[in-house]
Image: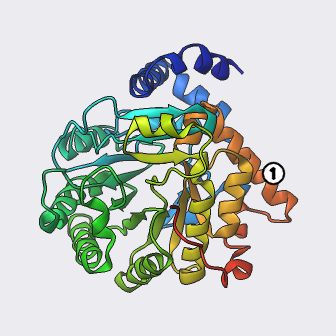
């Protein structure tokens, strides 16, 4: 209630990007106070064995994580973890720092509980992220994934080198890596999802990871767009299997604008960018079902896109996701959202007769396996 009042009275009167920086800075400051992280963890992270997930060679305290985009520069993964997230994915991180696209570049669609962003991989670069992750690595209590991208000025033909450079710098301090080839805000990036380009790129990243962390198995996943056709989803799934990839993150933001409650002219006035939040829910779920039908349990699937309630997360689990991520749902729902979703998942699992949430992964996939994901969003 307090968060909703604060959001209505303050945050909605501040442009979206400055509001984000203000809220995140306040959280980091709060968590620097003596004992605050420990207290927050004790109060907000559910200590429930039903939530524990074993996947990708790791034990996750809860399947509810924070998606990439919130903490682009590894400023506060421990502060975010203290809110009850089972894991935090930082980034997208590029090899070299870049400012991103011109401002304003982030907009709320409050009626739709959605956000449009065209940030353009604004970040301080892999060296800065590496220093921050290294500084807190020994005592870290939050699982941290790193989302990798290419610099805007890097030619498409040289993209693999960017991903390799970022992977080499960050792999030693990551719990998993995600190759992001699906943001709509870097020109030409989504073209890398074509299997003839994606295959060599992913192979190069996997080889780089094996070189820099030879003493442990570090999972590598790929993040795909919701706007892919069914045939393209199938092709990426088969490629991931052929390359021995560990998983797929489904999905990134969409360039579609259909079915919004916000007036069409108002949306058009905001310009280009990726749409996230509630309008993405059905398409993201459909892509997940398509992937599960194709790969079964041979890959770990991470669901993101339009998740804002325990029921949303539960539907993704039953459709085949082992882990789920929030971003826009966290922005609109507030700091208690990860706790609410995790506790809700445990409750829904028990109501359905499962001892653990993980036992329900893919429970609906047999019934869904014959159904196509439907056409991409227009």
Q: Residue at x 17, y 59 (%)?
A: 162
Residue 175 is at least partly visible in this image: yes
Vertical position of residue 312 compared to residue 318: above or below: above
Which quadrant would residue 350 be assigned to in this image? bottom right
Q: Residue at x 62, y 51 (%)?
A: 62
User: What x and y, as percent, mark residue 277?
Assistant: 56, 45
Q: Residue at x 86, y 65 (%)?
A: 353
Of 169 and 254, which appears nearest the observer? 254
User: What x and y, as percent, mark residue 336?
Assistant: 65, 32
Of 185 and 154, which appears nearest the observer? 185
- Residue at mark 1: 347
Of 286 and 141, which appears nearest the observer? 286
Please rate how many residues cluster around mark 1, counting C-alpha atoms within 10 Å: few if below 14, some from 14 to 19, many from 20: some
Residue 48 is at least partly visible in this image: no
Vertical position of residue 374 compared to residue 88: above or below: below
Which quadrant would residue 136 be assigned to in this image? top left
User: What x and y, as percent, mark residue 343?
Assistant: 74, 45
Q: Is mark 1 on a helix, strand or loop?
A: helix
User: What x and y, as percent, mark residue 302?
Assistant: 53, 62
């Amino acid at each position: 209630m307090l968060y909703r009042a604060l959001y209505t009275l303050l945050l909605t009167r501040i442009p979206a990007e400055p509001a984000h920086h203000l809220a995140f800075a306040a959280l980091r400051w709060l968590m620097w106070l003596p004992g605050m992280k420990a207290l927050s963890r004790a109060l907000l992270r559910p200590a429930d064995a039903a939530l524990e997930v074993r996947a990708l060679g790791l034990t996750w305290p809860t399947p509810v994580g924070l998606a990439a985009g919130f903490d682009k520069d590894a400023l506060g993964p421990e502060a975010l973890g203290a809110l009850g997230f089972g894991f935090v994915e930082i980034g997208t991180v590029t090899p070299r720092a870049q400012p991103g696209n011109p401002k304003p570049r982030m907009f709320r669609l409050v009626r739709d509980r959605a956000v449009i962003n065209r940030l353009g991989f604004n970040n301080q670069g892999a060296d800065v992220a590496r220093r921050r992750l290294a500084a807190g690595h020994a005592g870290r209590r939050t699982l941290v994934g790193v989302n990798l991208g290419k610099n805007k000025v890097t030619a498409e033909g040289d993209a693999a080198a960017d991903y390799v450079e970022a992977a080499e710098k960050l792999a030693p301090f990551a719990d998993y890596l995600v190759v992001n080839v699906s943001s709509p805000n870097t020109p030409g990036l989504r073209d890398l999802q074509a299997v003839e380009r994606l295959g060599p790129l992913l192979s190069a990243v996997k080889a780089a990871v094996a070189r820099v962390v030879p003493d442990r198995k570090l999972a590598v996943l790929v993040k795909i767009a919701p706007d892919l056709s069914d045939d393209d989803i199938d092709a990426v799934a088969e490629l991931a299997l052929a390359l021995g990839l560990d998983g797929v993150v489904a999905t990134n933001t969409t360039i579609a604008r259909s079915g919004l409650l916000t007036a069409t002219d108002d949306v058009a006035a905001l310009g280009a960018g990726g749409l996230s939040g509630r309008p993405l829910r059905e398409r993201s779920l459909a892509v997940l079902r398509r992937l599960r039908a194709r790969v079964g349990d041979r890959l770990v699937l991470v669901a993101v896109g339009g998740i804002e309630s325990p029921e949303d997360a539960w539907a993704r689990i039953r459709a085949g996701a082992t882990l789920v991520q929030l971003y826009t749902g966290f922005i609109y729902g507030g700091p208690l959202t990860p706790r609410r979703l995790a506790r809700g998942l445990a409750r829904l699992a028990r109501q359905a007769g499962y001892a653990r949430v993980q036992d329900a992964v893919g429970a609906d996939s047999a019934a869904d396996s014959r159904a196509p994901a439907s056409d991409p969003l227009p």
